[in-house]
Amino acid sequence: MDDTPLTLLSENRAFGGWHRRYEHLAHSTRCPMRFAVYLPPQAEHGPVPVLYWLSGLTCTDENFMQKAGAQRVAAELGIALVAPDTSPRGADVPGDPDGAWDFGHGAGFYLNATQAPWAQHYRMHDYVVDELPALIEAHFPVSTARAISGHSMGGHGALVCALRNPGRYRSVSAFAPICHPSQVPWGHKALGRYLGENPSAWAAWDSCALIAAGAELPPIKVDQGAADSFLATQLQPETLLAACAARGHEIEYALHPGYDHSYYFIASFIENHLRWHWIRLLG
């Protein structure tokens, strides 16, 4: 049992349940980490399943909980929502040396860095997959039925977490994920710095490469906005579709005309994702 102390930062009543924010000292990232949890009303009567949400570049634990409108449906279905921060933070945690927004603070890419100075703190994969669920399951009335989802960089993270850890999650979904990070500019920058310049080290953190290498494939759902300005250069969902097709694995994919990369897009379809996960969490 994880007895790491939690500091409550705030709490709000929502749809009969509770949204709370906490801070704790994380072993994996060696710094204080914040996360948000929404407990639906059903949690007052026994353990409920959990959806872990991974947000995108520049976000924190707050974006999804404030903008996606997920609590109403989570309260109806009886699903807990957990949203970690997107990176380690603090004065001792190095950020982007050039002050850019797409690397460092707010841009942990949900991997375990191997290169200095990033390796000491940037171990978001271990945090999301191991440390945070152990904490959640020890401190809150939740079951071990887990699903994972995310947006953009977080969509990449959700896919990689599920593919690298078979059986850990019953389902995975993503909004506008970075599907093939080893082949796009955001990925080149992040993977090159966190993991080194040898592309062979990047495959372990690339969804398409993991699928091609034979990773066990869970149920996958992806939604993408057709008016997303990052679609062609950074996201490339066609690469994920091709990788799954090569394995004979059908994923549920939808391209939505007129929708962009924003939380307006996520709010429009989050209910579909929660209901899709709920069916699989029941299984």
Image (cartoon, helix red, strand yellow):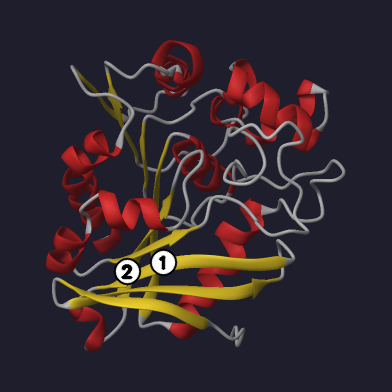
Residue 242 in the image: state x and y as whole percent. 44, 15
Q: Is residue 108 left or right of residue 37?
A: right
The quadrant of the picture occupied by the C terminus is bottom left
The secondary element bearing badge 1 is classed as strand
Q: Amino acid at mark 2?
A: Pro
Residue that appears at 16% across and 65% down:
77
In the figure, residue 151 lies in which quadrant?
top left
In the figure, residue 80 lies in which quadrant?
bottom left
Specify few, some or many for label 1: CA neighbours under 10 Å numbering under 14, 14-19, or 20 or more. Answer: many
Name the residue nearer the viewer: 94 or 83.
Answer: 94
Numbered disc in front, either 2 or 1: 1
Task: Name which of mark 2 and mark 1 comes first in the sequence.
Answer: 1
Q: Amino acid at mark 1?
A: Ala
Residue 48 in the image: state x and y as whole percent. 29, 75
The quadrant of the picture occupied by the N terminus is bottom right
List the single residue furthest toward the right: 116
Specify few, some or many for label 2: CA neighbours under 10 Å numbering under 14, 14-19, or 20 or more. Answer: many
The secondary element bearing badge 2 is classed as strand
**182 to 118, vertically: above or below:** above
For disc 1, the marked residue is 36
List the single residue furthest toward the top: 232
- The answer, for residue 202, to whether it is visible in the render is no
Residue that appears at 38% across and 69% down:
37
Residue 49's tag is: 2
Residue that appears at 62% across and 84% down:
4
- The answer, for residue 129, to whether it is visible in the render is yes
Residue 224's tag is: none
